[in-house]
């Protein structure tokens, strides 16, 4: 037992440390040459062991990935127990076939050009599907599995064309920084930009497919130009201003990607907003997404869309009434991993608000809401097979044809 005034003789001739007071002792230990030598001697064996077990950075990354997977596996088990999905579903009997020929066009829109990817032939198509993606993503991350599923199910054909619209700077391989030019752009101005895209492609009418922020853009466009829209199939559409939880989630991503310059952390936080814990644990898409957007330019081009969506205004009564003759089907899912201790039911609450307002305030005769359980916000990727049938019934129900 140490007492005041005791002198501690350090081993190996390193000197001594006098224990006058606890503060003085710690000061000698950490700041004197003798104490520094002792600490170096004590820390050397653990460092050597660390070096032996983790001989390079790649091994350490693999170790951390394994730790993360173990944690997510526990969440997955809890998820399966909650939703009763411990028995894997049988694989869908889909015939894989190549997608229709594609074409990429760069259209003149203000303030930045917009890239669109067209599947099929617009000249012969009688049914045109136009997609608009969510924040922090593009059409490839939001709609690839859904479109491949539609193609495998025979829902795409010579009379069907798909137009993928990527918000400026969100296309794969974007080589130009668009952040300064798009600063201050709102969701409302994106709807006006979409109108320029539709005009340049000479689309008479189309069926809109939108997720999250993209669904909001399509709602605004349809309310301004209802005669150009056959109908809307929307996933987690938002009609209200951002809730406090949503604003906090998006604000955390902007903080990491902006002031803190922690882009990898920002990408993973965005992945938690988009995908469920189950998808993060057992599918390759979230990891591929996180790795793809680690480059500074790729991520910096995404921030303006986040800021625009976070500062959106609510759709007013006049806009909702203008949608009265536009058939709408809404899908909602809220099982995204989200922020710890922050409830993330706002996607489903926003969808409920949209449907209630359309029915009660606008007397909308053709709107429905389908809830998808056990799924993150990107349900077109996590549950593509489950929503294909509903989309096909909706499309054929409004008089359009798929797969002919």
Image (cartoon, rainbow, N blue to C red):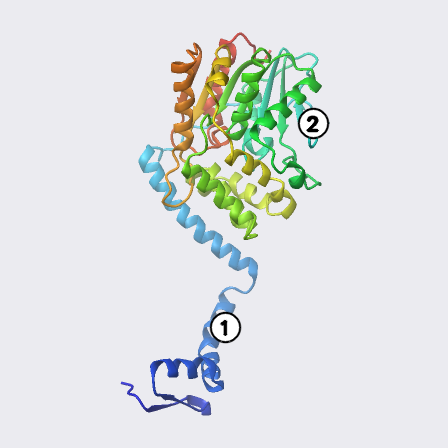
Q: Which residue is mark 1?
A: 48
View extreme (top): residue: 399
Q: Quadrant of residue 243?
A: top left
View extreme (left): residue: 1
Q: Which residue is mark 2?
A: 109
Task: Residue at 58% x, 31% y: name it.
Answer: 186
Looking at the picture, does residue 43 appear above or below residue 323?
below
Residue 155 in view here = no
* Element type where label 1 sits in the image: helix
Percent of width and height locating residue 153? 54, 19
Percent of width and height locating residue 366? 44, 11
* Element type where label 2 sits in the image: loop
Q: CA distance from mark 2 to mark 1?
A: 59 Å
Query: Which of the pair 61/30 is nearer the observer?
Result: 30
Q: Quadrant of the C terminus?
A: top right
Q: Quadrant of residue 167?
A: top right
Mark 2 or mark 1, whichever is nearer to me: 2
């Amino acid at each position: 037992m140490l007492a005041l005034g005791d002198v501690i003789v350090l081993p190996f001739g390193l000197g001594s440390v006098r224990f006058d007071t606890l503060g003085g002792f710690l000061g000698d230990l950490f700041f004197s040459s003798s104490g520094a030598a002792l600490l170096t001697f004590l820390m050397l064996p653990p460092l050597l062991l660390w070096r032996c077990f983790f001989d390079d950075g790649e091994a350490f990354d693999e170790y951390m990935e394994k730790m993360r997977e173990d944690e997510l596996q526990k969440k997955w088990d809890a998820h399966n127990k909650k939703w009763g999905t411990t028995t894997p579903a049988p694989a869908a009997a889909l015939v894989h076939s190549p997608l229709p020929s594609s074409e990429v066009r760069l259209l003149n829109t203000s303030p930045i050009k917009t890239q669109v990817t067209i599947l099929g032939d617009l000249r012969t198509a009688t049914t045109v599907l136009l997609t608009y993606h969510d924040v922090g993503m593009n059409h490839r991350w939001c709609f690839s599995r859904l479109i491949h599923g539609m193609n495998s199910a025979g829902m795409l054909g010579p009379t069907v064309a798909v137009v993928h619209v990527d918000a400026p700077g969100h296309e794969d391989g974007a080589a130009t920084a668009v952040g300064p030019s798009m600063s201050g752009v709102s969701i409302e101005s994106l709807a006006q930009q979409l109108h320029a895209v539709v005009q340049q492609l000479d689309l008479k009418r189309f069926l809109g497919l939108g997720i999250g922020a993209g669904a909001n853009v399509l709602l605004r466009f349809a309310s301004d130009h209802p005669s150009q829209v056959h109908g809307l199939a929307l996933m987690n559409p938002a009609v209200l201003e951002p809730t406090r939880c949503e604003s906090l989630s998006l604000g955390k991503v902007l903080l990491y990607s902006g002031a803190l310059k922690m882009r990898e952390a920002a990408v993973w936080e965005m992945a938690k907003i988009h995908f469920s814990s189950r998808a993060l644990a057992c599918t390759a898409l979230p990891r591929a997404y996180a790795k793809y957007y680690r480059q500074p330019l790729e991520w910096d081009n995404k921030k303006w869309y986040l800021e625009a969506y976070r500062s959106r205004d609510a759709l007013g009564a006049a806009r909702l009434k203008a949608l009265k003759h536009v058939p709408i089907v809404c899908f909602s899912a809220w099982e995204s991993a989200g922020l710890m201790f922050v409830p993330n039911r706002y996607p489903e609450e926003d969808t409920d608000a949209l449907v209630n307002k359309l029915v009660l305030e606008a007397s909308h005769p053709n709107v429905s809401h389908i809830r998808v359980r056990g799924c993150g916000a990107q349900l077109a990727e996590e549950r593509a097979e489950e929503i294909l049938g509903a989309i096909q019934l909706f499309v054929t129900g409004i008089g359009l044809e798929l797969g002919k």
